[in-house]
Image (cartoon, helix red, strand yellow):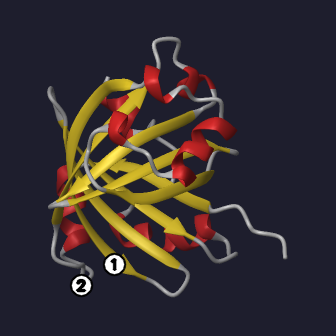
Amino acid sequence: MIMQEPIERELKILVSQDIYEKIIHSYDFTKPWKQTNTYFDTPDHSIKNQKGAVRIRTIGDRHIFTLKIRKDAITHIELEKDIDQSNMQSITDPEILNWFKEYQINKEQLSPITTFSTVRQTYDFEHGQLCADKTIYSNHIDYELEYEYFDQHDGISFFNQILEPFHITYIKNCPSKIARAF
């Protein structure tokens, strides 16, 4: 049996606060929750150079380790696992250590490069999920809509159907949150 890569497809668009407010009042989104993201890299930027990201996301008492490596503009390999604490150096999980080895990441050299918080709400569709994010950085706040999908379908057309009543069209207009943090 061949194991499939854990693939994530996401379309993101920055919107104004006004559009964000209209959209979150147009769907029955989940109750918002806060998540704090701390991103890590090595001094020689080995993760950035692979067009990847390593983060620990904290939601309440839960800590989630994530390693993302970009395959193309909308597709990532996403490896994710719950961990006991938000300290990168305390990770001893063999599966995560194997991911570091596979992507040639020296865990001992990882240090935090940025931290920010996002207030997220989600709404589920048949083939994916709409996320409405308000992200608070050290020097600004932005508003993002993300359509994340796992089933094969025309995600861009579907996302545009969601956006059409608000007179906007999906155009890749935003770098990643980690890039926006800088």
* For residue 139, side relative to residue 58 (left or right): left
Residue 36 drawn at (x, y percent): 21, 47
Q: Which residue is drawn at the image coordinates 76% and 69% (left, top)?
A: 3
Residue sitting nearer the eye, 44 or 139: 44
Q: Which residue is drawn at the image coordinates 50% and 76% (left, top)?
A: 128
Relative to 180, is 36 above or below?
below
Q: How many marks?
A: 2
> Which residue has dot 1 on it?
123
Residue sitting nearer the eye, 90 or 163: 90
Residue sitting nearer the eye, 154 or 138: 138
Q: The C terminus is located in which quarter?
A: top left
Residue 136 drawn at (x, y percent): 16, 41
Of the residues shown, which amino acid type is indicated by label 1?
A: Tyr
Relative to 95, is 22 above or below?
below
Q: Which residue is drawn at the image coordinates 34% and 78% (left, top)?
A: 123
Closer to the chain start, of discs 2 and 1, is: 2
Q: Residues within 10 Å of mark 2 (few under 14, many from 20)?
A: few
Q: CA distance from mark 2 to mark 1?
A: 7 Å
Outermost top residue: 44
Relative to 161, is 178 above or below?
above
Judge whether residue 171 can be spotted in this image: no
Residue 164 drawn at (x, y percent): 43, 69
Relative to 86, is 106 above or below?
above
> Which residue has dot 2 on it?
28
Q: Residues within 10 Å of mark 1 (few under 14, many from 20)?
A: some
* For residue 128, side relative to residue 70 (left or right): left
Residue 134 drawn at (x, y percent): 21, 52
Q: Circle 2 sits in a helix, a strand or a loop, which is it?
A: loop
Q: Are marks 2 and 1 in contact (CB under 8 Å)?
A: yes
